[in-house]
């Protein structure tokens, strides 16, 4: 039953991203060329909601779906970690024209070249799992 709920929420998320044009390569290019506020507004509102939700979870000691208290562990502060991660994420975003979230939305909208992107993302994740202990964290 839980899997069906996750699938339904994923479909709703995909439809929202598609209808809001946040999966559009043209909107992403407009954002990087500072020609439109559309994507900044969408990302900014998501950031705002995420910060508020995180504070509520921390202060109310919210519980997950299984009844366990949600634990938000502070991240290690490291320049290398965020520098390398940000550069690789940004380069991938710029080369593909989409961040990881809309890749499945773009595939669902009929852009079948995203199969290559999904395969590359899964391969990169697999490689990270293998090389994780050798990378700066």
Image: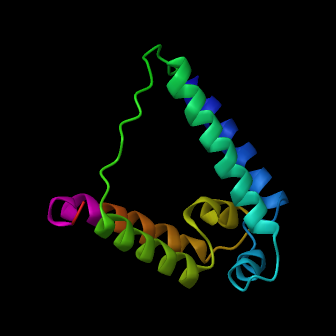
Prevalent SS, magenta region: helix
From the viewer's perspective, is residue 70 above or below residue 72? above
The percent position of residue 109, horizontal first and vertical second, equals 75, 65
Residue drawn where x is 60% and y is 42% of the image:
51
Please tell me whether residue 40 is drawn above or below residue 17 in the rendered image. below
Side of 61 relative to 34 (left or right): left
Front one among 106 and 92: 92
- Range of residues picked out in magenta: 127-135
Residue 30, image quadrant: bottom right
Instruction: Indicate the position of residue 31 as horizontal and vertical percent values.
Output: 73, 77
Q: Is residue 112 on the magenta stretch? A: no
Q: Residue at x 58, y 22 (%)?
A: 1
Residue in view at x 68 percent, y 42 percent: 49
Name the image quarter holding the C terminus. Answer: bottom left
Q: Which of 46 and 14 is in front in this view?
A: 46
Whether 120 is drawn above or below 29: the answer is above
* Occupied quadrant, residue 94: bottom right
Residue at the spot x=45%, y=25% of the render? 70
22 or 8: which is nearer to us?
Answer: 22
Most extreme residue toward the left, as rendered? 134
* Image location (x, y in percent) of residue 46: 69, 50
The spot of residue 52 in percent (x, y) is: 64, 37
């Amino acid at each position: 039953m839980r899997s069906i709920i996750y699938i339904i929420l994923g479909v709703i998320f995909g439809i929202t991203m598609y209808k809001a044009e946040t999966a559009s390569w043209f909107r992403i290019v407009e954002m990087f060329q500072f020609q439109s506020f559309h994507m900044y507004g969408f990302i900014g509102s998501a950031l705002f909601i995420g910060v508020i939700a995180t504070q509520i979870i921390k202060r109310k000691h919210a519980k997950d779906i299984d009844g366990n208290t949600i634990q938000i562990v502070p991240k290690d502060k490291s320049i290398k970690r965020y520098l390398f991660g940000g550069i690789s994420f940004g380069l991938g975003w710029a080369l593909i024209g989409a961040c990881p979230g809309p890749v499945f939305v773009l595939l669902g909208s009929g852009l079948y070249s995203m199969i290559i992107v999904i395969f590359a993302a899964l391969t990169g994740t697999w490689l990270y799992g293998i090389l994780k202990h050798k990378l700066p964290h």
